[in-house]
């Protein structure tokens, strides 16, 4: 049986981690590579880098971070942020990413998904979907881009199905309503999407305590949980999370 | 880093369809110094040949054929060279695949490559960490030294290999309820892994190291 995955996500800007990270014994807490190593050691099942660099010039800093990480961390690495064209996917994969997550680039032109999956395979294409319960679409949940600032008019479920149909191999679903609240994952939308698509769904946004992570695996069919500040600020460790999941009979990877 | 003094030359087969550097970096971290090449002499002179592959069956096989590498790999494996095919690099060792009908595989293993059954496997691709069920006759194989009986490794695939000879199956995994699929095969000097040892953390690195030490 597949294990449920715990995925730390690091926001990277110009090759450095943004948002402080509270870890003891790190030589450089701003270095994504150091942090990826630390999370790998502590039992992360995968690492996610989200590049929030605005300029194209700073892209080389990201590429450098990926290739340094790939030399030292031997678990899957997902990289996202600013992917617009199939050639961007190729650049990240060649640097050492295993999977590439695509968000607004796909809303702008879905061919980045279809062409990207044709060239590199569905297994490396993750569609990142940011949703809000705006009430303006068929299911009520609407896709947003630009970090949740811009409404697209697209229905979250329709978009999920469309991108999977185009070749996305996994969905990274972030609830803008839940994100940052620490009140728990948005279970209804996570369950809706996970029930209706036949690819893995990674739940993101809202985790504030252990129970939230247990709940998202117990009450929805999500395959993975993405975590950021909860881990970065040392409020929970990966081993605490995995122990709690294990006690609740949720299959996890032993490390 | 101190590189291991070894007489074994490792060649990672260069192709357009693989994340070659993951395997390269994994070998380096284990103290081995591989080369990445599609040059005939490099391949012939190597002691260990590794073929990592991602993507789909037809274009990968087409590239091998165009470069003349299909017959070279077949000849090298026949001569007894230690060989490891990873993911698609394993699938290509079989006779044929449902993914690329009318295209012959290398036929080093008898059998075919089949799609995961969507009625049983709820999420396709089969992505994530799953447990290896090592077959009884392979439990004491060197490749599992220090690995333990409940090894979990990283998968990402939509097709799987079905060898005609069940004795070639080294390990299976449960991809769906009561649905065991072969994910590691061996015949003489040829090995295939459906999972990614280079992305499977300490367990994967250990298996890769055990494999390299077979030479």
Image: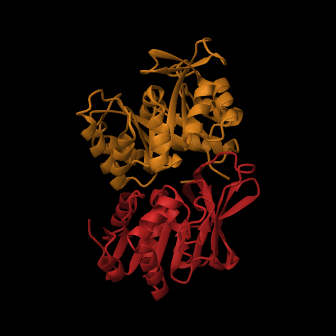
Chain colours: A orange, B red
Q: Is residue A79 above or below residue B202?
A: above
Residue B67 coordinates in the image, percent (x, y): 38, 70
Image quadrant where one finds the C terminus of chain B: bottom left
Q: Position of residue A92 (x, y in %)?
A: 36, 45
Which of the 4 quarters of the picture holds residue B212? bottom left
Please state which of residues B5 and B85 is positioned toward the viewer in this rendering.
B85
Q: Nearer the viewer, residue B43 or B10?
A: B43
- Residue A185 appears in view: no
Of all residues, the one furthest to the front in this rendering is B102
Q: Position of residue A123 (x, y in %)?
A: 52, 48
Q: Is residue B58 above or below residue A146?
A: below
Return the residue found at the far bottom. B79
Quadrant containing the N terminus of chain B is: bottom left
Residue B158: image x %, image y %? 60, 54
Q: Residue at coordinates 25% horizontally, 39% vertically from top-left?
A: A61
Left or right: where does residue A147 sit relative to residue B168?
left
Q: Residue at x 38, y 81 (%)?
A: B47
């Amino acid at each position: 049986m597949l294990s449920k995955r715990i995925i730390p996500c690091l926001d990277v800007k110009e090759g450095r981690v943004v948002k402080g990270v509270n870890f003891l014994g790190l030589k450089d807490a701003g270095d994504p590579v150091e942090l990826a190593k630390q999370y790998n050691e502590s039992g992360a099942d995968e690492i996610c880098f989200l590049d929030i660099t605005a300029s194209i010039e700073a892209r080389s800093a990201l590429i450098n971070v990926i290739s340094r990480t790939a030399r030292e961390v031997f678990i899957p690495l997902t990289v996202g942020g600013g992917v617009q064209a199939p050639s961007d996917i190729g650049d990240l994969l060649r640097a050492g990413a295993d999977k590439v997550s695509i968000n607004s680039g796909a809303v702008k032109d879905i061919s980045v998904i279809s062409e990207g999956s044709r060239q590199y395979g569905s297994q490396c294409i993750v569609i990142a979907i940011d949703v809000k319960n705006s009430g303006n679409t068929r299911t009520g949940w609407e896709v947003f881009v630009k970090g949740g600032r811009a409404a697209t008019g697209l229905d979250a479920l329709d978009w999920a199905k469309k991108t999977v149909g185009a070749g996305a191999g996994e969905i990274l679903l972030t609830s803008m309503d839940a994100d940052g609240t620490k009140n728990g994952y948005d279970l209804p939308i996570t369950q809706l999407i996970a029930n209706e698509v036949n690819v893995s769904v990674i739940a993101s946004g809202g985790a504030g305590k252990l129970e939230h992570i247990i709940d998202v695996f117990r009450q929805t069919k999500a395959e993975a949980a993405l975590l950021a500040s909860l881990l970065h600020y040392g409020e929970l460790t990966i081993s605490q999370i995995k122990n709690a999941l294990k006690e609740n009979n949720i299959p996890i990877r032993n490390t | 880093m101190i590189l291991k003094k070894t007489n074994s030359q490792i060649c990672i087969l260069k192709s357009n369809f693989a994340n070659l550097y993951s395997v390269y970096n994994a070998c380096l971290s284990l103290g081995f110094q591989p080369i990445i090449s599609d040059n005939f002499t490099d391949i012939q002179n190597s002691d260990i040949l590794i073929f990592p592959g991602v993507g789909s069956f037809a274009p990968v096989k087409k590239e091998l054929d165009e470069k003349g590498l299909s017959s070279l790999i077949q000849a090298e494996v026949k001569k007894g060279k230690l060989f490891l095919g990873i993911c698609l690099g394993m699938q290509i060792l079989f006779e044929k695949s449902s993914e690329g009908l009318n295209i012959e595989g290398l036929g080093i293993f008898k059998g075919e490559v089949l799609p995961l059954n969507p009625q049983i496997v709820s999420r396709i691709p089969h992505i994530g960490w799953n447990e290896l069920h090592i077959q009884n006759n392979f439990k004491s194989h060197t490749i599992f030294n220090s690995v333990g009986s409940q090894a979990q490794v990283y998968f990402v695939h939509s097709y799987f290999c079905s060898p005609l000879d069940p004795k070639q199956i080294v390990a299976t995994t449960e991809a769906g309820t009561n649905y065991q699929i072969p994910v590691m095969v061996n015949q003489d000097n040829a090995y295939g892994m459906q999972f990614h040892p280079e992305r499977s953390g300490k367990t994967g690195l250990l298996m890769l190291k055990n494999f390299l030490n077979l030479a």
